[in-house]
Amino acid sequence: MSDQKVFKASAESKGKAKQLRLFAFLAWIIAIAAQIFAIFKLIGNETLTWLIVAIVVILGLSITGSMLWKKANKLDPASEKDKVKFFVQNQLGAIMGVLAFLPLVILIFMNKDTDKKTKGIAGSVAVVALLIAGISGVDFNPPSVEKYTKEINEQTTVLKDLNFDNDQVYWTKAGNKYHIFEDCQHIKGRDVINSGTVKKSWDEKGISELCKTCRNRAVKQKETKALEAAE
Ligand SMILES: [Zn+2]
């Protein structure tokens, strides 16, 4: 098809994604630094409470990093063509989550100076934290350039069918919907209303979908026009 549209993240999206990724790395680096501190200073019978506190802190940082990372991927997804890059980019949160805990888990169980009870408590808390960090980092439905491209073309077809071959839409910065009508109740009166094609709304926001209120209104408008034409 000659009019096939291909998703391309806007410069602004790419910039925002870059910033989010930077913050994600920052959270992961602090998490790993905290882990190193815990390994050297907190594995022991007397420091069990502090070890558990450290594990909770590391878990929080690790989950925060994964959330920021996934958000960045939604704005600026990888292409499915490069399988390795696609996997690493989408599952990096899980990889970092495991890295933030695995050495600690191993060293808790290998430590010779702690008693059985401490080992049991600290070890099981750390294993649970590892599992939570790992699973919450997995992207079960990773975004991709190809998926976005498919959506853009399908949604453009739907929209043109609804709105007399016109795929001009409106959207605001917040939210992930676009609107056919500039005076839709959901965006009316907003300071900044952007407009452009369906593709542009994807390029600028990542995941986008048509507002239901606008869709119903467009369906009615189309029916009315069809009736008028029949008369
Ligand atoms: Zn609307």
Image (spheres, rainbow, N blue to C red):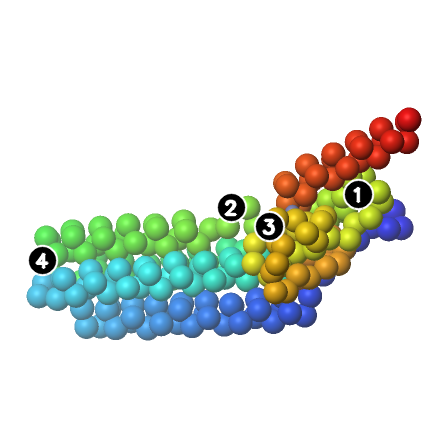
User: Are discs 1 and 4 less than 8 Å apart at CB?
Assistant: no
- Of 9 and 139, which appears nearest the observer? 9
- The structure residue drawn at horizontal position 55% and vertical position 46%, both measured from the top left corner, is 141
Is label 1 in a helix, a strand or a loop? loop
Q: Nearer the viewer, mark 3 or mark 4?
A: 3
Q: Nearer the viewer, mark 2 or mark 4?
A: 2
Is label 4 in a helix, a strand or a loop? loop
Check disc 3 and report the residue beneath it. 186
Check disc 4 and report the residue beneath it. 115
Distance from mark 1 CB to nearest ligand 1 atom below 8 Å: no
Q: Amino acid at mark 4?
A: Asp
State whether residue 142 is above or below residue 68. above
Q: Amino acid at mark 3?
A: His
Of the two numbered discs 2 and 3 on the same chain, state the one appearing first in sequence.
2
Quadrant in the picture for residue 172: bottom right
- In the visual, does 33 lie left or right of 54? right
Distance from mark 3 CB to nearest ligand 1 atom below 8 Å: yes
Distance in Å between CA atoms under marks 2 and 1: 34 Å
Check disc 2 and report the residue beneath it. 140
User: Are discs 3 and 1 less than 8 Å apart at CB?
Assistant: no
- The structure residue drawn at horizontal position 12% and vertical position 66%, both measured from the top left corner, is 47
Asked if one can make out residue 132 in the rendered structure from this viewpoint, the answer is yes
Q: Nearer the viewer, mark 2 or mark 3?
A: 3
Q: Amino acid at mark 1?
A: Asn
